[in-house]
Structure formats: structure tokens, C-alpha cells
Amino acid sequence: MMQHDPTVRGRLEERDVLEVFSPAAPITRRDFFSGRTDQLEHLLDVVAQRGQHAVVYGERGVGKTSLVTVATSGLVDRRTITLRVNCDGSDDFISIWRKVVCEARLPRPLPPVVGIRELLGQAAANAAPLLESARVTVDVVRQALQLLSHPAPIVIIVDEFDRLEQERTKTQFADTIKALSDHVVPATIIVVGVAVNPGALLGEHRSIERGLRPIQVPRMPPAELAAIARFALGKLEMTIADDAVARIVALSGGLPYYTHALGLLASREAVRAGESAVQVAHVERVAPRVID
Ligand SMILES: Nc1ncnc2c1ncn2[C@@H]1O[C@H](COP(=O)(O)OP(=O)(O)OP(=O)(O)O)[C@@H](O)[C@H]1O
Ligand SMILES: [Mg+2]
């Protein structure tokens, strides 16, 4: 068998870069997550306050799912259960809540509470029949959530909300949020979707309810994008030239998707060439494949 020589080419493989750059997947780990301190704080405030819910909105690919995933990742240690569901074009009010209850039955990290797995399983089994009826009203959903949140407070992330096609579903959601606030159910709803303002997601006047906190996810500032590239390269034990970082940041235009895609391809170029530093030439070479 051929021996690998202990050079960069020998130690680092092309697929290693996939561990640190993830253009196709949201960030799940805090250490890989750059910036967004205000939004993280706002989300944690919402979760901590009874009767508060959030609508997280912004452009496509700006980092909404990463934000809510990282913000809620530590909640399990605070005795809170997080469930996330994605909406699609075929969903309506009932189907989303059925998804939520199904989600509660799947294995997941749970808070360190004695018997929590059985309690949550039982709570889901109690809630499910309420959602079987053909006429599921806002009040029925409120009751189902009251049952589901009995073992521990629950955070429900309803992502891709912009995919819902019926206006009525959005209105029912806004009404559910109001009902949960009024009845002080220990369930926090975080609605997430592509929109220019919260009204575009949830309906104009319903989105200004007191209990609903709008959290905008803006494009990322250059320093936060630069941090993504530098952190990833650091993990690979590679370096990146300042002008290469600057070029990646400029091409990204505030969208972290591009930073990941350019970082991935440029560092792969460097690894292929057996170099341990990413140079601006590597970035220029791959840019046409990423930016149209
Ligand atoms: N704060 C961050 N730090 C590092 N990388 C990030 C951050 N936010 C997002 N990303 C990266 O940017 C890309 C898009 O992120 P994400 O999927 O969270 O965006 P989104 O707004 O939910 O997109 P969509 O509108 O398609 O649902 C992913 O590659 C993700 O890993
Ligand atoms: Mg998303």
C-alpha cells in the first residue's frame, strides 16, 4: 500500500472541507455560527417570556433556519423541548399541527427530567385524537398544545411558512398564537419564513399583536461573513490570505450561503493543489461556478 506523506495533501482530504462548509444545510452548532447576537438574544427573550411568540423573517438563504436552530439548541438543558416542522404547499392548518404531534413522538434529545420520554409520548398520544376530527378549530389546537406542553414547556418552530398557499391558514395561525398567549399555555410558537415584513407572512394586522415579536434576519455584515470563512479554515488547520477573505465577502453580498459555497470550492482547490493556504486566485477560479 502506498504511504501518505505527511504533507497537507497527505493529511487533509478534499472531503474534509465538507465538514466545515455547508452551503446546503443550516448551521446546527453554536461554534460554527457567526454573529447575530441581537437576534439570538431576542429569540431567547421570547422563549423566556410567557405569552410571547416570534415571527422570524428575511430573504431566502439569509440564515433564518440556522438562527432558530442555534438559538433553541441549548434549551433542552433548560428543561424545554423544541420541535421543528417545515411547511409545504400542500399543508393547511390541521396538517401542520398533525406534523407537530408526529414530531413529538420521534426520538430526540429531551430535558433531564425523570420519565420525560414516557410523559411526552403519553402527551402526544392524548393530543393526537383532538386533531383527528374534520373540524379542527383554533381552540382545539390550543387544547392539544396544552396537553403536549404538560410534561415540559415546548417551543414549536414552524419553518418555511411562506410556502403555505392558503391565506386562511396564516390567519388561523395568527389566531392560535393569540389564543396561546391569552390562555398562558407554556408553548412558544416561532414562525419562520421568507418575507420582507412580518405582515407578509402572517397577515397585515394580525402580525402586530402584542404577544408576537418580529425578528428580522438581515443580510450579514462583512465582519460576520469573514468570521465564517476564517473559522472554517482554522478548523481545517489551513490559513486564508486577507485578500481572499475580502473577495469571498465581497462576492457573498451579505448572504452566508455564498460564503459557504465559495469557501468550500476555494479550499478544495487549495487542498487539491497540496497547499495549506487559500489564496485569492483559488477564489477567482471557483467564483464563476457559484455566482451567476
Ligand atoms: N450565522 C451563520 N453563521 C455561519 N453560517 C451561516 C449562518 N447563517 C446561515 N449560515 C449558512 O448560510 C446558508 C443558509 O442558511 P439557512 O439555511 O439558515 O438560511 P435560510 O434563511 O433558512 O434559507 P431559506 O430561505 O432557503 O430557508 C447555510 O449554508 C448555512 O449553513
Ligand atoms: Mg430555512
Image: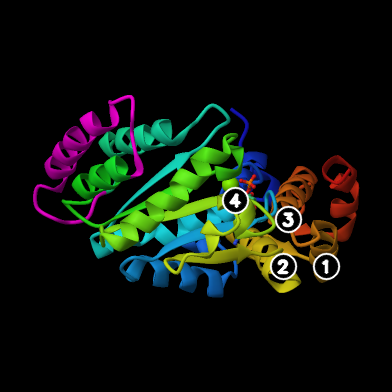
Q: CA distance from mark 1 to mark 3?
A: 11 Å
Q: Residue at x 68, y 51 (%)?
A: 8
Residue on which the image places disc 1: 246
Look at the numbered disc 4 and say if its residue's Cβ is closer than 8 Å to ligand 1.
no
Return the mark for residue 259: 3
- Mark 4 is on which residue type? Leu
Q: Sequence-wise, which precedes: disc 1 or disc 3? A: 1
Distance (Cα) linking label 2 and label 3: 8 Å
Examine the rendered structure and indicate whether residue 208 appears above or below residue 292. Answer: below
Identify which residue is drawn at 64% across, 52% down: 200
Residue plotted at (26% across, 64% down): 78
Which mark is nearer the camera, 2 or 4?
A: 4
Q: Amino acid at mark 3?
A: Thr
Residue beneath label 2, please? 226
Asked whether the beta carbons under mark 2 and mark 1 sit within 8 Å of each other, the answer is: yes
The amino acid type of the residue labelled 2 equals Ala
Label 4: which residue? 201
Colouring convention used in this rendered image of the protein: rainbow
Residue contact between numbered discs 4 and 3, judged by CB atoms under 8 Å: no
